[in-house]
Image (spheres, rainbow, N blue to C red):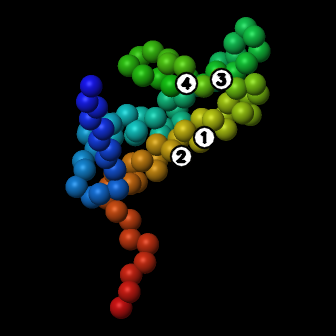
Amino acid sequence: MTFYYRTTTATSGDQQVSEKAKAFWEHASAKKNWRIVQLPNGYYQTELLLEDSWKDVTRRETLEGAEQAIDTSIAHYKSRLEFAQGPKVVKTFE
């Protein structure tokens, strides 16, 4: 039996992010598309509005923990959008 194993990296500048992925990241990075609901067991569930229905994302023990999870997710998607624009120059030399 032969196995083929291949790895790729997203750090090279020639890879393009699909428009569908960018649209999702923009949608997920807006806090108005998120909500927190309390479950019967007392936990709090974060949900993201996708295609006119709420999809569960995470569950947390506290309301503060659920809001922290949403804020962390928003920061994650914003950073993806930033890096999709291309490499960021952090230092130049003369």
Residue type pointed to by label 1: Asp
Which residue, given by chain and number where applicable, does mark 1 sit on?
71
Is residue 25 placed above or below 44 in the rendered structure? below
Is residue 14 placed above or below 57 in the rendered structure? below
Structural crowding at the residue carrying mark 3, measured as other residues with C-alpha within 10 Å and reported as few (<14), some (14–19) or many (≥20): some
* Whether label 3 touches label 4, CB < 8 Å: no
4 or 1: tag closer to the N-terminus: 4
Is residue 43 placed above or below 82 in the rendered structure? above
1 or 3: tag closer to the N-terminus: 3
2 or 4: tag closer to the N-terminus: 4
Q: Quadrant of residue 17?
A: top left
Which residue, given by chain and number where applicable, does mark 4 sit on?
57
- Quick one: 42 or 26, which is closer to the camera? 42
In the rendering, at what x and y percent does residue 11 appear? 35, 56
Q: Is residue 27 left or right of residue 17?
A: right
3 or 2: tag closer to the N-terminus: 3
Q: Is residue 4 left or right of residue 82?
A: left
Give the distance between the C-alpha atoms of the residues marked 3 and 4, in whole angstroms: 7 Å
* Whether label 3 touches label 2, CB < 8 Å: no
If the image is split into quadrants, where does the C terminus sit?
A: bottom left
Residue type pointed to by label 2: Ala
Which residue, given by chain and number where applicable, does mark 3 sit on?
59
In the rendering, at what x and y percent does residue 88 appear? 38, 65
Residue type pointed to by label 4: Val
- Name the residue located 34 percent from the left edge and 50 percent from the top edge: 9
Q: Residue furthest bottom?
A: 94
In the rendering, at what x and y percent does residue 81 appear? 39, 48
- Name the residue located 54 percent from the left edge and 28 percent from the top edge: 34
Give the distance between the C-alpha atoms of the residues marked 2 and 1, in whole angstroms: 6 Å
Which residue, given by chain and number where applicable, does mark 2 sit on?
75
Give the distance between the C-alpha atoms of the residues marked 4 and 1, in whole angstroms: 13 Å
